[in-house]
Amino acid sequence: MAAAVAIAAVVVAAVVAAAASAAAPASAGEPTRDVRWEVGYMTVAPLGVSQKVIAINNQFPGPLLNVTTNWNVRVNVQNNLDEPLLLTWDGIQMRMNSWQDGVAGTNCPIPPGWNWTYQFQLKDQIGSFFYFPSLGLQRAAGGFGPVTVNNRAVVPVPFAQPDGDITLFIGDWYTKSHVELRKMLDDGKDIGIPDGILINGKGPYSYDNTLIPEGLQHETVGVEPGKTYRFRVHNVGTSTSLNFRIQNHNMRVVEAEGTYTYQQNYTNLDIHVGQSYSFLVTMDQNASTDYYIVASPRFVTNESRWHDVNGVAVLQYSNSKGRASGPLPDGPNDFYYKSYSMDQARSIKMNTTAGAARPNPQGSFRYDSINITQTFVLKNELPLRINGKRRRTINGVSYSPPETPLRLADLHNLTGVYKTDFPTMPGNAPPKMASSTLNASYKGFLEIVFQNNDTGVQTYHLDGYSFFVVGMDNGDWTPDCRSRYNKWDAISRSTTQVFPGGWTAVLVSLDNVGIWNLRSEKLDNWYNGQEVYVKVADPLGYNITEMIMPDNALYCGLLKDLQKPQIHQVNSKSSAQAADRWGARVLAMVLLIIAAVVSI
């Protein structure tokens, strides 16, 4: 009897422990932010033409996700669109948890009318990021919003507490729907010059009545004289690099995509598609009038048609004496002047003495002393025809996404879904469409060289990581270029520009198991195949270091028959009710065990 009781006690303890583990958030002891987002269409007319945009909780742009380092996040997404949906989290690293990354290689999409809950931890991160819908050019219709990850109280911020925090989304914009743009690409056409540039989803301030139609709603940023504000600026456009500036005000760069920067003032800064920056701006002018906030196009080939396309908002002091008027503040002299922009990019450096997510200085990770274990040289070129279709390539391969996500295919030991033969160097093989990945070694130190043989600026983003941008220059990269790398205070970020006819080199420590998307952030290029997945497999086997597949994982493609009918979660109360039901089941199991012991 005593032995039976002891065994029962062990079983009860195991059951209770399992219950606690299943019910616990991603990291016990850390706060959890629970939100519910309804994703659907709303009608607006930012450029004077009524059009459907993708809104979240009837907001365009979407709501702020405001969290702190190491917090857990649960985002229940209801898809009220008429097409599948995934949300991805630009710059959020999803440590050991590519299941939550929200791209086609790791997740089945949320069908129309369904909901799905993302659950992840903001592990060891701070900074300014954004989320957006990752499928089928949907970001060109909206669906984006800010993610702000604040420092923990124990880690000081390397500047005085600002008097306010302001988020600005800048981006080129089309009055055509994302469905129309998608069809143009499917038909082998170019999507052409955008119709305008929006700031926070609004059209330009009427700085010139001959250029801007009457009645457009513009963004106004209200400020107090003498105070300092943190501006978090994200380029969420389709394809256009933008120059950002605030009339008569210096912008002190302090952070770029989760890394505190060496602090220096700029009168303007080029922000490329997918990039994010934080500026400190002090309201030190006399407020004789309001001031212009401007986002203007860069690196565009048809200057005459682009000349009058600007995004313009208004900075308004509380004691302003009049409306903004007159010409816009000057940006760079030449739409296509590479050297100016490249020098700017090189000047953005890491603040090596400041802590970030942890108290130890950012510069304490001495990347210069680590030996490179792998090198990928990834070359993109002008668009070309493959099987009669207009496509974009990396190393001659245009990525073709399979119906079954790569990560699910691995877990279920499916063969033939994709290959692991993506070329790590440019070659002479004929261009092709394929589903293949780059294999990278876990715990290795990877060098990626982006070689841009196109005529426009490229921006590349790597999910799951940030990388050190150690070098960029004109011409073709060779191993000798390593002698020019920044080996001490290179900025660490997740999205980098690559100038036309040039190269950019990054270094990344491969400490995050999973399958991670490496893509062009220019939506038309991404849609046309300019992406690849980097497979970082744990040699001990999947689900050893990596988090296990979530219970709510969706199935599609070859695994669609595994998908069960969905019980929709309608609010956070249902989560509590589910927990209560789980607790009741646990109690019932414990009582059954005790009854069995008593009967022995």
Image (spheres, rainbow, N blue to C red):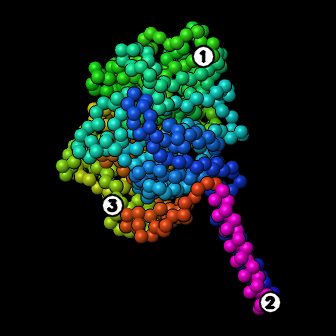
Residue 485 in sight here? no
Residue underneath mark 3 = 419
Residue drawn at (48%, 68%), measured in percent from left and top? 564
Rounded to the nearest angstrom, the CA distance separating label 1 from label 3 is 58 Å
Residue found at x 41% / y 39%:
52
Q: Which residues are magenta?
A: 573-600
Image depth: mark 2 or mark 1 in front? 1
Mark 1 Cα-neighbour bin, 10 Å: few <14, some 14–19, many ≥20: many
Mark 2 and mark 3 in contact (Cβ < 8 Å)? no
Residue 317 among those drawn in magenta = no
Which of the numbered marks, if any, corresponds to residue 345?
none
Q: Quadrant of residue 41?
A: top left
**Magenta span: chief secondary structure:** helix
Please give the label number shown on residue 317: 1
**Disc 3/disc 2 C-alpha distance (Å):** 58 Å
Residue 446 image point, x, y percent: 44, 48
Q: Amino acid at mark 1?
A: Tyr
- Label 2: element kind: loop
* Residue 148 horizontal/vertical position (percent): 59, 38
